[in-house]
Image (cartoon, grey):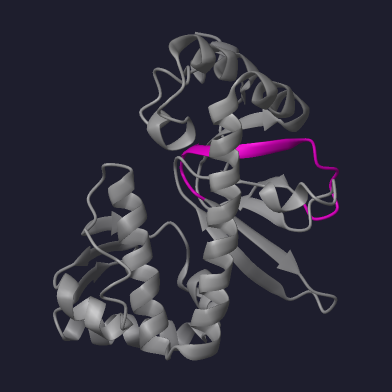
Amino acid sequence: MSDSHKYVVSCQACSLNALCVPHSLTEEEIELVDATVKRSKPVQRNKTVFESGDAFSSLYAVRSGAIKTYSVDEDGEEHVIGFYLPGEMFGMDAISRNVHISSAKALETTAICEIPYNRLEELSAKVHNLQSHMYRLLSREIADDQDLQLMLSKKTAEERIGNFLLNLSHRYQMRRLSPTTFRLPMARTDIGNYLGLAVETVSRIFTRLQKNQILKVDGKEVEILDHNRLCEIANACHEHKH
């Protein structure tokens, strides 16, 4: 099988289509979307999909693996902006300026779908529900950013870690994966950077949660043993429900 065919999976055949493609699209409309999507070889770990300053031409969706978006300040310090899991779209922050204001890097071998933006605009004119879906995605991105800013300004280190784990749990559950046993594709340093914590603090809290039998941690594999207690620590019982 040639490389060009090895990685081709249609939107209809993809197990993530309920997350990427609106439920209300007809089979013909999904075929229109599918014909627009570009798929290529998986991006290897630590390779970038795009870099800050690159011209904007496409949006991207993760099919497998995980993506980290980040910016680099004038002192060369990296600032993690977000993590994207299968079924999640990234690159939307470039729409307004026509240039990527952040960089995106694969945290592990990652398969992505590329959606040329000019074709997406044409499609949205033909497929009404697709435009509504894009608005919802943009709205969720804004809401998630606001939640992060609130968390960084108000919550303790333990609350931040608790919220981070519960958020991942919810996102894995949306993918019909286990909400209690999952892999952390990102390094502890990236988690600390994202949450505004020293890596030593992250490691200390993970150790404490494990000692208190709230988590079981084995390298990057995490099992939530006591969801209710993690919820209490995060002070977010009303925000994250199974």
> Is residue 36 left or right of 148 when viewed as pictured?
right
Q: Is residue 41 visible?
A: no
Towards the viewer: 170 or 103: 170
The quadrant in which the C terminus is found is bottom left
Residue 189 x, y percent position in the rendering: 52, 74
Name the residue at 80% across, 55% down. 52
> Is residue 239 left or right of 58 when viewed as pictured?
left
Residue 41 x, y percent position in the rendering: 59, 27
Residue 174 x, y percent position in the rendering: 32, 46
Towards the viewer: 173 or 191: 173
Name the residue at 57% across, 54% down. 139
Name the residue at 67% across, 72% down. 79
Tell me, yes or no, whether the highlighted magenta stretch contains residue 62: yes
Q: Is residue 149 visible?
A: yes
Is 181 above or below relative to 95? below
Q: Which residues are magenta?
A: 51-66
Question: In which quadrant of the rendered view does residue 73 lie?
Answer: bottom right
Name the residue at 38% across, 78% down. 161
In the rendered picture of this protein, how many numbered marks are placed on residues?
0
Tell me, yes or no, whether the highlighted magenta stretch contains residue 39: no
Residue 61 x, y percent position in the rendering: 56, 38
Is 205 above or below relative to 27? below
Which residue occupies the extreme front position in the image? 128
Is 44 above or below relative to 75? above
